[in-house]
Image (tube, grey):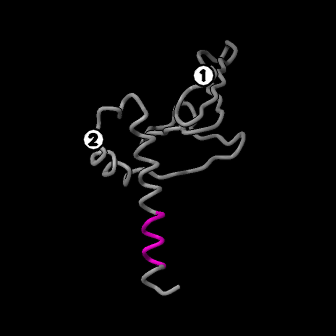
Amino acid sequence: MNKHNYQKMLSKIEIKNQNKLVDFFHSLPYFSNWTRGGLLKLHYFFEKKPAIMNQQIVREGDQSDRIILIKRGEFEVRKHSNPFIEMKKNRVHIDAGKILQY
């Protein structure tokens, strides 16, 4: 395989990945009315970060500097309402951006 064909193949893979992400964004209610062009521009600001089981992503009280979209998996939300009261927990299962179990 020569350099040109290799770069062409990589370009096709990148376009396919971009389209998958744009389709995912478009499936979410907030982004459903956005144009594909707008979502394609938006996707450049997102970073895919896989997480492992029991990994803490955000801690209550942390300053927010990003949006987290969960495409697939299961996560737990913990909320401290009062130091003298038991912590509230919610477990959520998500597949392709849709909440399947709450």
- Amino acid type of the residue that numbered disc 2 sits on in the rendered structure: Thr
As displayed, is residue 87 above or below residue 15?
above
Q: Residue at x 47, y 56 (%)?
A: 17
Report the Cα–Cα distance between label 1 and label 2. 36 Å
User: Horizontal placement of 20 versus 45: left or right?
Assistant: right
Q: Residue at x 33, y 50 (%)?
A: 40
For the image, the number of numbered tags is 2
In this rendering, would 35 be left or right of 77? left
Magenta residues span 6-13
* Residue hosting label 1: 79
Give yes or no for residue 15 being in the magenta stretch. Answer: no
Q: Give the residue number, with chain letter if any, for mark 2.
A: 35
Q: Quadrant of the C terminus?
A: top right
Q: Residue furthest top?
A: 85
Picture coordinates of residue 12, whole percent (x, y): 44, 65
Q: Secondary structure at mark 1?
A: strand
Q: Image point 41% across, 60% down: which residue? A: 15
Give the residue at x 42% y 54%.
18
Above or below for 7 versus 30 = below
For the residue marked with disc 1, what is the amino acid? Answer: Lys
* Label 1 vs label 2, nearer the camera: 2
